[in-house]
Image: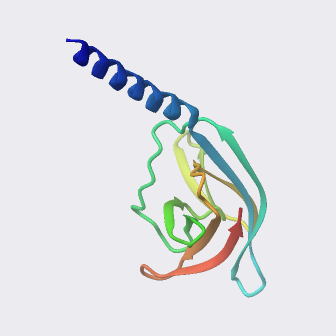
Amino acid sequence: MKLLTVLFLIHSCASSNDLANKKKETPKIVFLTYNIKKNTEKETEIIFEKLKIVNGKIKGFSNNNQNQTMGDLECSFLDKNKNILQIVHIKNPLKKLVEFVNNSGNLEKKIFEMDSTQFVIRAPYFANTRFIEISEKTSGKTLKKIITTKL
């Protein structure tokens, strides 16, 4: 009976240590701010602006790549060996969809193509992330790498 009690106590202590270690790992969110523009040759240029990491968890984070079209961006989070940790898909930030009520009272949508704008990538943060690589979807499934940011 004493042996069972001792084993139970050891197991309980081990479990509480595991829980304490898990509690120390607070989930984080990374915010990456970039500027994007089309140059005179109509090629996409992206410039890194700033990085912010905050405590928190993104509720309902889903990152499906359905309905990606030409000009959309793919943001790859890479480790020190440039292995992919996660991929975030971004609709083309230079195309803004605006909904408005027209003169006849109906809801209408219009896409405005901009020359330049700023956009923010928000994603769960992995501590072993070392690089952010942004590529632009060209024709078919082809991606053209635009920028790699070292964190």
Name the foreground residue: 110 vs 71.
71
- Residue 34: where, in percent of width, then height? 73, 61
Name the foreground residue: 101 vs 34.
34
Vertical side of 13 occupied by 41: above or below: below
Q: Quadrant of the C terminus?
A: bottom right
Q: Residue furthest top?
A: 1
Vertical side of 34 occupied by 123: above or below: above
- Residue 140: where, in percent of width, then height? 42, 81
Report which quarter residue 45 is drawn in: bottom right
Give the color scheme: rainbow, by chain, secondary structure or one colour.
Answer: rainbow
- Residue 124: where, in percent of width, then height? 55, 47
Vertical side of 80 occupied by 144: above or below: below
In the image, taking residue 61 as reference, residue 49 lies left or right, namely right
Q: Residue at x 67, y 73 (%)?
A: 148
Q: How many marks?
A: 0
Q: Residue at x 27, y 14 (%)?
A: 5
Q: Residue at x 59, y 57 (%)?
A: 128
- Residue 117: where, in percent of width, then height? 75, 61
